[in-house]
Amino acid sequence: MIKKCIGILSFFCCSCLFGQDYFPKNDGVKTTNTNYTAFTNAKIHVSSGQIINKGTLLIHNGKVISTGTNVSIPKNTKIINIEGKSIYPSFIDMYSDFGIEKPKAQPRSRSQAPQYDASRTGYYWNDHVMPENEALSKFSYDSKTAKALLDAGFGVVNTHIQDGIHRGTGALVALNNKEGNETRILKENSAQYLSFDRSATSRQAYPNSIMGSIALLRQLYNDAAWYKKGLSKTKDLSIEALNRNQDLIQIFEAGSKANALRADKIGDQFGIQYVILGGGDEYERIDEIKNTNAAFILPVNFKDAYDVENSFLTSSLALSDMRAWSQEPTNPKVLADNNINFALTTHTLKSPSEFKDKLMQAIKNGLSKEKALEALTLIPAQLLGQSTAIGTLNNGAYANFLITSGDIFEKKTKLYENWVQGQQHIVTNMNTIDIIGDYEFSVDNTAYKMTVEGDIKKLKSKITSETKTLGSKISYNNDWVQISMTTKDSTSQDFIRIVAHVENDAALKGKATLPNGNEIPFSAKKSTKAEDDSEEKNKKNDGSKNNIASISYPNTAYGFKTLPKQETLLFKNATVWTNETDGILENTDVLIKNGKIVKIGKNLSDGKAQIIDATGKHLTAGIIDEHSHIATASVNEGGQNSSAEVSIEDVIDNEDIGIYRNLAGGVTSIQVLHGSANPIGGRSAIIKLKWGESADNLIYNDSPKFIKFALGENVKQTRYSNGVRFPQTRMGVEQVYIDYFTRAKEYDALKKSGKPYRKDVEMDVLAEILNKERFISCHSYVQSEINMLMKVAEQFDFNINTFTHILEGYKVADKMVEHDVGGSTFSDWWAYKYEVNDAIPYNAAIMHNAGVTVAINSDDPEMSRRLNQEAAKSIKYGGISEEEAWKFVTLNPAKLLHIDNRVGSIKVGKDADVVLWTDHPMSIYAKAEKTIIEGVTYFDLERDTMLRSEIKKEKNELINQMLKAKNKGLKTQPIKKKEKVDMHCDFIGNIIN
């Protein structure tokens, strides 16, 4: 052991000898400190799993030489005895913008024309992609912020420019306030950073949605692969930087569980395993999070309790927000329990000084201290590939360590010093005597009790006499205490001033100055019992742990405690609307098994089936909405005149309450369409409303491929005050289509030729249309444009699948039949903008009678809940039969979506997507009693009534817990009323989830 230590010492001495700096010194004599420093008799946490009691830590030249109980100490060693104290590795924050000024947003005005092209040349075509950025190019060491981080226990940060979709590389920096960047910079290119967020420094319009960001990243990776082969004809410094740094750790700022899963899909597609910055809500979908196989960086900015004293404002609080306050502190524990690697970060905290209190919440909610230490030291070091240099106190590591009064994860523990690269940073003087606790004293024959609380640098005092609390202030510096307090006589507003020296036993001795100026001796003795009980007292009074709210799926109001299971169900004596040649069957039984309709008839039986008495009730196929914008995080990518590369499937929001509300209206399937911001929109998602399931599980298996096109005012930006994007006329819209399909035809020919080609997702999608592999749903109103698009399609030898809205369809119904295109329309909307002035409520009936396959759609989250009544309007306007009108919202939209082989009617072999109605399904009195998808009951009227009561009870319990938290002095936040954003065809932006 001694020989080993001597060898290590020799190595470091040689390193010091040959590693002398070559800079001239003009401010004094140039000397080299060759001394060692040894910290003895300490409890040393070498790493999260290795502890040495009464050990010695020997450091030299900024590195750890040795740790142990039998360390050989050289003669030229400064020995510091820290008996009774503990040493830990300094913390690492691997997600920071330390030393980098926050990018300033470009000034914008409503009259300013959008920017569609990149502002740079020689770089990638999109300003929001900046792999060439290097943190060091913008880095300036910030001593003030460094001090705050050092005081919180951090010794190393991984910093980067927090701006843009691809943000370039970060730098690993030691918080060494006493030396320069030549020593502090541990690694100049430590990681690549990505996000879904646009750059604040550019006004380039694309992307303006999450799905646009996803598509942009996919295209970037495709372009990087093409460029790497040397096939690009132009130079791209952005892609060169991306390829050069491809082996670095890739850190993706997701900020929510939903975005974490979206980011992971991109990584999986291109063989990249991201480290993901989470949002603190990962516990809600922990199985999906675990399946990413990603390591996470977890923020600890847990929600404060809401101030719920105003009952009117409190009524606007969503249950999900209230639960988050209760559940978020469990997030680290849940990840730990599921063996998911994670590091902790100060990211999103207002100040690093908040970090310990937040971390203590996580520990009180089950996170082990060992795991907490690991998440702040070894794990971030390993993820950064720096575990031999930082994160432990192993021999050869940087001398980055903390000296504490005890267990660092106890509230009463004091952090004395934070050493970084062997440089001392004093947080709290190690020799400062602790005066926190309870005291008793007497002044001028009056007895007082005093409690001193808080941090040693910012103490608070509470002084009482008998039962009266007096105003008081306390300060403590250099072993002297200054106290000012009011007298018992509140009418006089007089003060007693005390100055006292702190003795070794924490007793106070000095003098008190009375209101009349007389000085008298003062002494106060610290209560030893209070010291012994302080930790238990803190646990009782901190109020940070309550009964944790249960998680549901989704974790909102009306969610399931456990996901519902497929059942065998037998409906007896129902009026069955088959939508088949059998028509409407009275007093009929329907058996559902294994998610399918297996029998239809009378007097059916099944020993394992749950019997449902449907006497006097109506059983129908589930309603299908051909045109919806619920259940998505974004609806338009309008930054370009074509966004075929984007997909709604990437941004399905499985927690949208609109799903549950649609189920309550008997809706089982919908097509979630891109909006109408551009002539060629994004790809659709056809989903089943499986409330509580993951986003992926909502999407149809082997889903037919659809894309949204649009005509009219929206795409030519008629109502934009600053619209300049091509096209600006209806003629221009036609040319957009011709241009894009001409390019797609050329692209497809090159692709099929076997020659090298640059993969272009947008062109791939348009080529699918030309190859009749993808269907078009087109937003349309005016007959001239409808005619135009049919002619363009025929020119390129394909058909339009569906004209949606199609409010002038009655004018061109014969041409629609000839083209074999369906019509999905509103029942009676009209005159809400100029191009719909000719709309009539007879539109659906006229198209139907001409032979067009007609559906009634919603394009609205409220209307979609009553599509059964919208269908009934066609009986009034046009004399459509009840059965045919009902097909407008069931079988016909299924045909338009090419899923009628699975859903849309009650037929043996089809999916068991059915609705039991209390009354005639098109009656205004009818309610969906049960809505069933593939044999699973996702909505039940009786359960809904019970849930309303449970939700009220749960909210009341959480309100009481929040009131208790406020009464205990814990921080609260004001209630900000949030209005649910309902998205329609013209909505621009994202729903944050």
Image: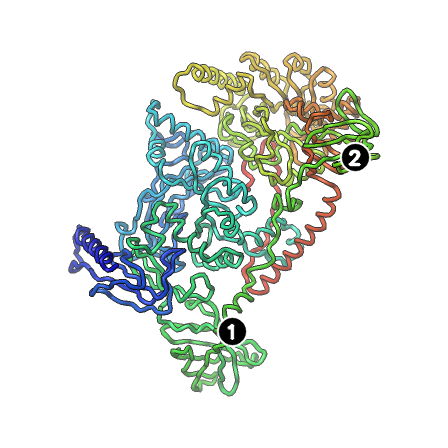
Going by the image, does 364 lie left or right of 750?
right
Determine whether, in the image, residue 233 is placed left or right of residue 587. left
Q: Residue 613 or 426: which is nearer the viewer?
A: 613
Identify the mark at residue 924; answer none if there is no mark: 2
Q: Name the side, left or right, on which 83 lies relative to 780.
A: left
Can residue 459 be seen in the rendering of this structure?
Answer: yes
- Report the number of numbered marks: 2
Marks 1 and 2 sit apart, C-alpha to C-alpha, by: 66 Å
Q: Left or right of 373: which side holds 287? A: right
| Element carrying mark 1 | strand
Q: Reply above or below: 15 against 454.
A: above
Residue type for callout 1: Lys
Question: Observer-nearest residue: 985 or 757?
Answer: 757
- Whether residue 550 is situated above or below residue 414 in the rendered picture: above
Q: Residues within 10 Å of mark 2 (few under 14, many from 20)?
A: few
Residue 769, x across and y down, in percent: 54, 19
Q: Position of residue 827 (x, y in %)?
A: 72, 27
User: Which three-letter amino acid code belongs to the residue tagged 2?
Assistant: Ile
Check disc 1 and report the residue beneath it. 462
